[in-house]
């Protein structure tokens, strides 16, 4: 097996979830999704626009903070990544806190744009490195962004997949249920089931998530690491240290 | 008639922010007014009601930690790559501040409603989020332009008493250059009073230079300007300087305890005026 860091596997795995699109956007505090978006852009022969909000170079908005949301509302953004401190089996995510709101026992930063983006962006990819019963729960304590909507509520998109430190799952909004798509090298389907707090569909045979090849790792460690250093310096230094 | 204006001191600028004011502040990428925030803390401001546009980092954490804040409407408060905002987190859990949880596009829409002076703007999405349950001021209606059966959320206008931000420069007429950070224009348009600190003064008028005019905020929106060189430090300023990452990293660690935060405040902000 190629010697590859967990962050590199996750970036390549997220990139593999990105369909053929025109515009991929990456929100706050998302270094691995940013790496995935740049990887997709470098490998495709199509013209694809990448927006990384915390970058100057990869942020071409000129009409203020609302422009991302207005562009997304119009369907001009095809892919967006959302994290969740908790994610449940119906693809609801919680970015607010633990406990019974507003009587929280733990407080997280807040909802950001998630309750909006999950409706207007066709392909939302959920991402959470920690895959445990603590993070992947039966029911989130607070629904920041619903994973599905009842009939009659306008909705263009929503979660399509969940990528974690252990596995990839696909989400079916009509059935409101995840299905295990692959387990990362070193993981087993049973192990993933034990580490997941919600029920999901298990295929008969579960493939292993492909490890990034040498060319992919070369892109991540070379040009992509250099780009990430502009807007995620701590992440770049930790995962892609500059040789002394 | 004169178009000339005179900048005032940072202390005089923040003296115009009354205790209890609804104060709009920008995100860290958009001219965080850190020098003015330190002055506001030193002046002993109390019971501020903050609106972050749409989120905040160190600026709001300092104001909360220093006891200046009663409530905050926000889409998120965090130190980003450096972790949770320690004072915000402590205050929310201890319920010493009230949090009005929002989402980024709702804050932008509320300000845009005030720009037009209409009572609300509708937004798609958000329905089914628990935010809606806890925001009685957000109303869901049936789209009156459709045949029926199309629920849509209305966001009420946000009308801050004061907008406070830092920008690269002001010209001799008191126009402020904000470049492409147009949310600063939105905040100013929506607020009753706009107070700005700038890195420097520009000798001339932005409106004599078409390339500068495109990024200018006209003086008629702005009540006062103060010069504060490196006034966004340790948060960066667009096009001017980068954040002081070592400072932010150290803050995230030091402010984890109340004693640590008090030490930071005494060292970096200075003596806080006793409450009258």
Image (cartoon, coloured by chain):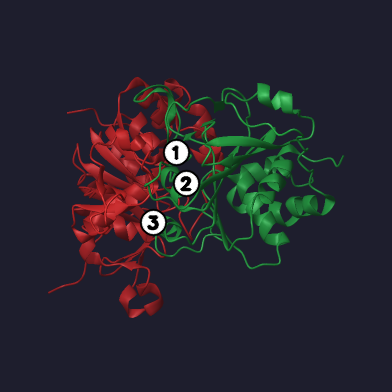
Chain colours: A green, B red
Q: Quadrant of residue A39?
A: bottom right
Question: Mark 1 near mark 2, Cβ–Cβ under 8 Å?
Answer: yes
Of callouts 1 and 2, which one flags the residue occurring earlier in the amino acid sequence? 2
Whole-percent x, y for residue A175 in the image: 53, 38
Q: Quadrant of residue B99?
A: top left
Q: Which residue is mark 2?
A: A118
Q: Which residue is mark 3?
A: A66
Residue at the (51%, 39%) spot, across then down: B248
* Observer able to see residue B8: no
Residue at the (24%, 28%) spot, across then down: B274
Q: Nearer the viewer, mark 3 or mark 1?
A: 1
Q: Label 1, secondary structure: give it.
A: loop
**Label 3, label 2: how far apart the Cα atoms are:** 16 Å
Q: Is residue A100 above or below residue A79?
A: above
**Label 1, label 2: how far apart the Cα atoms are:** 8 Å
Question: Mark 3 near mark 2, Cβ–Cβ under 8 Å?
Answer: no
Whole-percent x, y for residue A2 in the image: 86, 42
**The label number, if any, that marks residue A70 in the structure image:** none
Quadrant (top left, top right, bottom left, bottom right) of the N terminus of chain A: top right
**Label 3, label 1: how far apart the Cα atoms are:** 21 Å
Question: Which chain is indicated by disc 2?
Answer: A
* Observer able to see residue A62: yes
Q: Which residue is mark 1?
A: A146
Of callouts 3 and 2, which one flags the residue occurring earlier in the amino acid sequence? 3
**Residue count near mark 3 (Cα–Cα under 10 Å), binned few <14, some 14–19, many ≥20:** many
Q: Are marks 3 and 1 on the same chain?
A: yes
Question: Which chain is indicated by disc 1?
Answer: A
Residue at the (34%, 72%) spot, across then down: B203
């Amino acid at each position: 097996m190629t010697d590859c860091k967990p962050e590199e596997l996750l970036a390549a795995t997220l990139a593999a979830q990105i369909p053929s699109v025109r515009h991929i956007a990456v929100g706050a505090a998302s270094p691995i999704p940013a790496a995935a978006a740049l990887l997709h852009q470098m490998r495709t022969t199509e013209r694809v626009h990448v927006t990384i909000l915390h970058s100057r170079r990869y942020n071409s908005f000129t009409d203020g903070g609302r422009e991302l949301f207005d562009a997304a509302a119009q369907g001009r953004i095809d892919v967006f990544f959302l994290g969740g401190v908790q994610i449940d089996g119906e693809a609801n995510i919680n970015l607010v806190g633990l406990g019974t709101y507003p009587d929280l026992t733990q407080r997280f930063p807040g909802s950001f744009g998630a309750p909006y983006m999950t409706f207007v962006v066709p392909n939302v990819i959920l991402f959470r490195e920690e895959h445990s019963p603590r993070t992947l729960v039966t029911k989130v304590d607070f629904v920041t962004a619903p994973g599905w909507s009842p009939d009659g509520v306008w909705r263009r998109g929503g979660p399509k997949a969940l990528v974690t430190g252990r596995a990839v799952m696909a989400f079916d909004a009509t059935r409101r249920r995840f299905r295990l798509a692959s387990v990362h090298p070193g993981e087993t389907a049973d192990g993933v089931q034990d580490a997941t707090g919600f029920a999901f569909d298990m295929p008969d045979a579960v493939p292993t998530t492909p490890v990034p090849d040498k060319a992919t790792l070369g892109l991540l460690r070379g040009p992509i690491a250099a780009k990430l250093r502009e807007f995620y310096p701590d992440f770049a230094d930790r995962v892609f240290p500059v040789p002394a | 008639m004169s178009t000339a204006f005179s900048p005032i001191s940072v202390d005089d600028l923040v003296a115009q922010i009354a205790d209890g004011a609804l104060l709009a502040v920008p995100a860290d990428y958009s001219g965080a007014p850190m020098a003015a925030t330190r002055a506001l803390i030193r002046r002993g401001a109390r019971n501020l009601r903050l609106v972050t546009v749409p989120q905040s980092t160190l600026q709001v954490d300092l104001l909360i930690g220093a006891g200046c804040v009663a409530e905050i409407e926000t889409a998120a408060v965090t130190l980003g790559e450096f972790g949770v905002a320690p004072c915000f987190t402590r205050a929310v859990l201890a319920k010493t501040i009230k949090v009005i949880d929002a989402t980024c596009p709702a804050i932008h829409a509320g300000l845009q409603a005030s720009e037009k002076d209409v009572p609300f703007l509708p937004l798609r999405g958000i329905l089914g989020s628990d935010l809606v349950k806890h925001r009685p001021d957000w109303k869901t209606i049936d789209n009156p332009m459709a045949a029926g059966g199309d629920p849509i959320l209305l966001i009420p206008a946000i009308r801050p008493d004061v907008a406070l931000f830092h920008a690269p420069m002001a010209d001799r007429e008191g126009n402020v250059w904000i470049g492409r950070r147009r949310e600063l224009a939105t905040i100013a348009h929506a607020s009753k009073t706009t107070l700005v600190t700038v890195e420097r003064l520009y000798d001339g008028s932005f409106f004599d230079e078409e390339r500068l005019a495109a990024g200018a905020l006209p003086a008629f929106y702005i009540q006062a300007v103060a010069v504060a060189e490196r006034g966004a430090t340790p948060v960066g300023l667009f096009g001017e300087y980068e954040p002081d990452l070592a400072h932010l990293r150290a803050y995230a660690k030091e402010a984890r305890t109340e004693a640590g935060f008090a030490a930071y405040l005494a060292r970096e902000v200075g003596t806080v005026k006793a409450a009258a």
